[in-house]
Image (cartoon, helix red, strand yellow):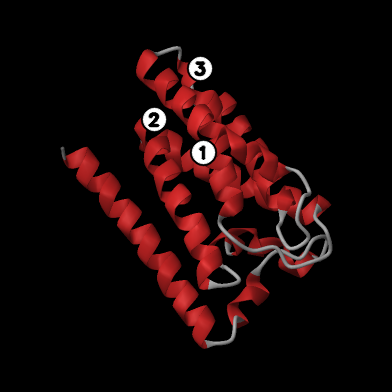
């Protein structure tokens, strides 16, 4: 039971941090969005670590928040070590992929992380070959499989690049960190 309590505390902290950052961003006319990723601009490379915390609007944050928290909670079922290694892998591969290959625009939002955890969850259950984890992977595939269309360039103001490279980062994390 204490494991679930700790997981819920982590989710509450993540939600609170994202909401507080969004409130500050809204009160400062989105001034924090300058810390997003601008592809191929060297000064913006470190912002691969800040971009997932920034959103264009409260609606943008809310769109990401529920699947982010759900996928984080499901990813935590593989243990803390695997979760943190997965998170770092998604952040690095997603961010560097956007920095190298993204369109010339500032890329922000947690959706790259959402897609990363999604990719992780799709593959990780099958890597373990254990029924409870396979069930998680199958349920995520059935309930959220439509997200795969989000890695395609369908809308001008949506960073499909963050979706794509986050997803790839999640698949790599599942392959690397789940035995």
Does 50 sit above or below residue 73? below
Left or right of residue 154: residue 48: left
Q: How far across and how far down the image is residue 30, in percent?
A: 60, 80
Q: How far across and how far down the image is residue 35, in percent?
A: 64, 72
Seen as rendered, the residue at the extreme left is 1
Does 10 sit above or below residue 136? below
* Residue under the point 55% across and 87% down: 28
Q: Distance between the residues labelled 1 and 3?
A: 16 Å
Q: Can residue 4 be seen in this view?
A: yes
Check disc 3: other Cα within 10 Å, few if <14, some if 14-19, many if 20+.
Answer: many
Check disc 2: other Cα within 10 Å, few if <14, some if 14-19, many if 20+.
Answer: some
Left or right of residue 34: residue 57: left
Frontmost residue, 151 versus 78: 151
Q: Quadrant of residue 106?
A: bottom right
Q: How far across and how far down the image is residue 72, in percent?
A: 42, 44
Frontmost residue, 22 versus 150: 150
Does 26 sit above or below residue 178? below
Of tags 1 and 3, the one toward the viewer is 3
User: Dot 3: what SS?
Assistant: helix
The residue identified by callout 1 is 86
| Contact, mark 1 vs mark 2 (Cβ under 8 Å) | yes
The residue identified by callout 3 is 126
User: Dot 1: what SS?
Assistant: helix
The residue identified by callout 2 is 78
């Amino acid at each position: 039971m204490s494991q679930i309590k700790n997981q819920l505390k982590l989710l509450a902290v993540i939600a609170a941090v994202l909401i507080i950052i969004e409130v500050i961003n809204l009160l400062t006319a989105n001034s924090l969005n300058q810390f997003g990723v601008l592809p191929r601009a060297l000064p913006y490379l470190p912002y691969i670590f800040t971009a997932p915390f920034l959103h264009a609007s409260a609606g943008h944050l809310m769109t990401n928040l529920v699947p982010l928290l759900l996928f984080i909670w499901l990813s935590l079922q593989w243990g803390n070590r695997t979760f943190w290694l997965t998170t770092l892998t998604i952040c690095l591969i997603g961010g560097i992929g956007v920095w190298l290959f993204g369109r010339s625009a500032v890329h922000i939002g947690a959706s790259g992380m959402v897609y990363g955890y999604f990719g992780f969850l799709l593959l990780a259950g099958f890597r373990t070959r254990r029924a409870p984890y396979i069930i998680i992977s199958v349920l995520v595939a059935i309930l959220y499989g439509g997200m795969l269309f989000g890695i395609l360039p369908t809308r001008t103001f949506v960073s499909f690049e963050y979706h794509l490279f986050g997803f790839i980062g999640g698949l790599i994390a599942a392959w690397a960190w789940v035995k």
